[in-house]
Every structure is written in structure tokens, then in C-alpha cells.
Amino acid sequence: MKSAIYIRPPTLADIENFLAAARASRALHRPWIYAPDTPAKFRTYLERMAPPANYPFLVCRRDTDALVGVINLGNVVRSMLQSGYLGYYAFVGHERQGLMGQGLQAVVRHAFTSLKLHRLEANIQPGNAASIALVSACGFKKEGYSPRYLKVGGRWRDHERWAIVVP
């Protein structure tokens, strides 16, 4: 069965659609994530998410090319670790349809096969049940708890560590 989505890197040509989706999704995202929502923030995001340390992906609907969400593979470390960190968010209207699950599986496959990574980690705020359900359904295992791990929305927030390794 063909996937309902495809993944691709964002480009400057996506700015209008991305910003509209991010602005419409504020209520869905907060307090978990603060997506780029201005032209300057989007440009900074594109500059910061450059390979070989970072790999951004848009999850897009195959039938309409609509932006479903974002999956960022960041802080890639090579050498003996071969690891990276994932951050992601859906855009409103596409949540709870299994599309981000397909997108996450596609990014994991790409990371393990094309990028030859060994391990991926997602750090999730404990109250974000939808995000925890997503990684759990995609084969990630909970490894631990990190108090005051990441600063999100101006506050240090606790996170659970979820990871997956090459099978």
C-alpha cells in the first residue's frame, strides 16, 4: 500500500504555506512547541537546519501536497555515536489521522538507511500524550526522565527521553 504522505526538505518557496499553517496551528502546538511564525523566523529556521548536522523535513499529503507537519532531525553526531535528535509537530487539520506516524516512520527509515545513523532520540514533555503515543507507535522506547531539560516558550521544562536504534 502506498503511503498517504511523502517527506521533503523545506525551501524558501514554502514560506507562505508554512507560515499560514504555523499560525493556524498555534493552539494545537502550545505549550509544546513554538513553530516559526514570521518570515524572519522561517529564514532563520532554514539557515539553522542545514546538513550535515541538521536535516529538516516537511511531511506532505501525497494527494494534495498540503503541509501535514514538520519533522526535524537535528544535532546529528557522527563518529562512534551515529545519532540524532528528533523534533516534530503536526499542522492543524492533519492531526490524529496517522499521517505524522507515516512521516515519522519515513524519517526514521531515511535516517537509518540513507544517513546511516544508529540511534534517534525524541525528548517529549510528559503531558504531551499525543507525542508520546506517536513515538511509542513508531517503535521508540522510553529510556528516562530529564528534569528541566529544554527551554520551551521561555521556561525550562521536564522531558521524557524516547529512543529507537537500528533493529
Image: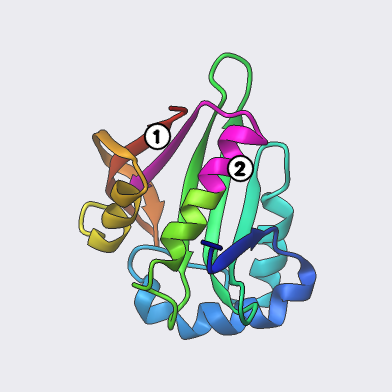
Q: Describe residue 12's horizontal placement relative to residue 32 as left or right.
A: right
Residue lying at 59% horizontally and 38% vertically, measured from the top left: 111
Q: Compared to 139, does 29 lie above or below? A: below
Q: Secondary structure at mark 2?
A: helix
Counting other residues with Cα less than 10 Å from the Cα at mark 1, is it few (<14), some (14-19), or many (20 or more)?
Answer: some
- In depth, the one of 141 and 17 nearer the eye is 141
Residue lying at 28% horizontally and 63% vertically, measured from the top left: 130
Q: What segment carries the magenta color?
A: 107-124
Where is residue 73 drawn, in percent x and y?
56, 45
Judging by the rendered image, the residue that carries numbered circle 2 is 110
Q: Compared to 166, does 65 lie above or below? A: below
Point out the tag, 2 or 1, that comes first from the N-terminus.
2
Counting other residues with Cα less than 10 Å from the Cα at mark 2, is it few (<14), some (14-19), or many (20 or more)?
Answer: some
Snapshot colouring: rainbow
Q: Compared to 117, does 161 lie above or below? A: below
Residue lying at 65% horizontally and 77% vertically, measured from the top left: 65
Amino acid at the residue labelled 2: His
Residue lying at 55% horizontally and 42% vertically, measured from the top left: 109
Task: State the separation of the CA atoms marked 2 and 1.
Answer: 13 Å
Where is residue 16 drawn, in percent x and y?
69, 82
Where is residue 105 drawn, in percent x and y?
48, 50
Instruction: Give the image quarter of residue 128.
Output: bottom left
Q: Describe residue 85's horizontal placement relative to residue 142 as left or right.
A: right
Farthest residue toward the right? Answer: 13
Judging by the rendered image, the residue that carries numbered circle 1 is 164
Q: Describe residue 128's horizontal placement relative to residue 101 as left or right.
A: left
Q: Is residue 136 magenta?
A: no
